[in-house]
Amino acid sequence: MTSDPAPISLLLVDDERTLREPLAEYLTGQGFAVREAESAAAARSVLREHTPDIVLLDIMMPGEDGLSLTRHLVETQGLPVILLTARGEAMDRIVGLEIGADDYVTKPFEPRELVARIRTVLRRVEKGADSAPVPADDFLYAFEGWTLDPLKRRLTDPEDAVVSISTAEFRLLRAFCDHPRQVLDRDRLLDMVQGREAHLFDRAVDNQVSRLRRKIEVDSRNPMLIQTVRGGGYRLAADVARTRRTAD
């Protein structure tokens, strides 16, 4: 006899009790195992004891806001995050996507749409994990003296010094390393980096490229590695080798 699969574990973070509690009840009825938190501090407390499969996170909360918590979740735990936003928070949504959130839903929303988005994000995360051509800990990217470690998400410069990069910058650089010397337009980059169809936010890609250039280019105003292709997008103008990992 085979046991039933464990339910999807979900952390719902929202300070608005009249929204949080009915939504938690609805999601539980849809088969999710839901934990609730009324603040970022409460969410961090939950996360010390339990790692969910996905986080639903309100942007506007007293104390630490949802964007700060999103950055923490993405950079330290790699958790998928769906932001719950008010209609007037367009810039916050863009920032949220830039720092690694997987999707957003605008309040008020239809709960069935939210469930569909949750399942879509989880399928995408699972597909991304399954489609890796080589185990992440089995190789390093090397280009023009730089090394990108996909397991540790660590970038080192030609002098072997570690250069700090955000999750969004890591995803962007890895996309370039997977497609060296190929022109990648904004839509394709956004799909690869964010894992979602978000053409309305293509400026997010430009911002990420600018930040990445400041870290890897000798002169970010005259980039030689990540080049702009007029009318096309961007390309990594370097050959990329995959080298086997050696013991640290």
Image (cartoon, rainbow, N blue to C red):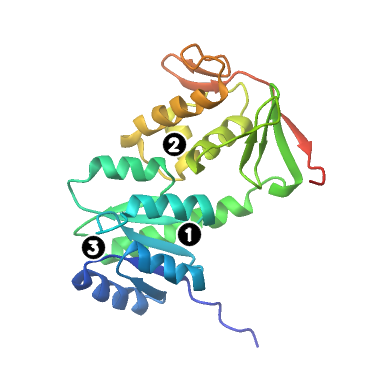
Seen in the picture, residue 39 relative to 87 is either above or below; the reply is: below
Which label's residue is closer to the chain start, 1 or 2? 1
| Quadrant (top left, top right, bottom left, bottom right) of the N terminus | bottom right
Q: Amino acid at mark 3?
A: Glu
- Tell which residue pokes out farthest to the bottom in this image: 1
Viewed as shown, does residue 222 lie left or right of 180? left
Q: Residue at x 71, y 24 (%)?
A: 145
Front residue of this view, candidates 24 and 133: 24
Looking at the rendered structure, the secondary structure element under dot 3 is: loop
State how many labels appear: 3
Q: Which residue is mark 1?
A: 122
**How far across and down, in percent of the image, does residue 227 sit?**
52, 17
**How far across and down, in percent of the image, does residue 32 sit?**
41, 74
Q: Amino acid at mark 2?
A: Leu
Q: Amino acid at mark 1?
A: Leu
Q: Which residue is mark 2?
A: 190
Residue 236: give its label. none
Asked if the residue under mark 2 is in contact with the one under mark 1, i.e. CB atoms within 8 Å, the reply is no
Question: Dot 2 surroundings within 10 Å: few (below 14), some, or many (20 or more)?
Answer: many
Asked if the residue under mark 3 is in contact with the one under mark 1, i.e. CB atoms within 8 Å, the reply is no
Which label's residue is closer to the chain start, 2 or 3? 3
Front residue of this view, candidates 185 and 175: 175
Q: Which residue is mark 3?
A: 110
Seen in the picture, residue 218 relative to 162 is either above or below; the reply is: above
| Mark pair 1, 3: CA separation | 19 Å
Which label's residue is closer to the chain start, 1 or 3? 3
Residue 28 in sight in this render: yes
Q: Residue at x 82, y 43 (%)?
A: 246
Q: Residue at x 28, y 54 (%)?
A: 59
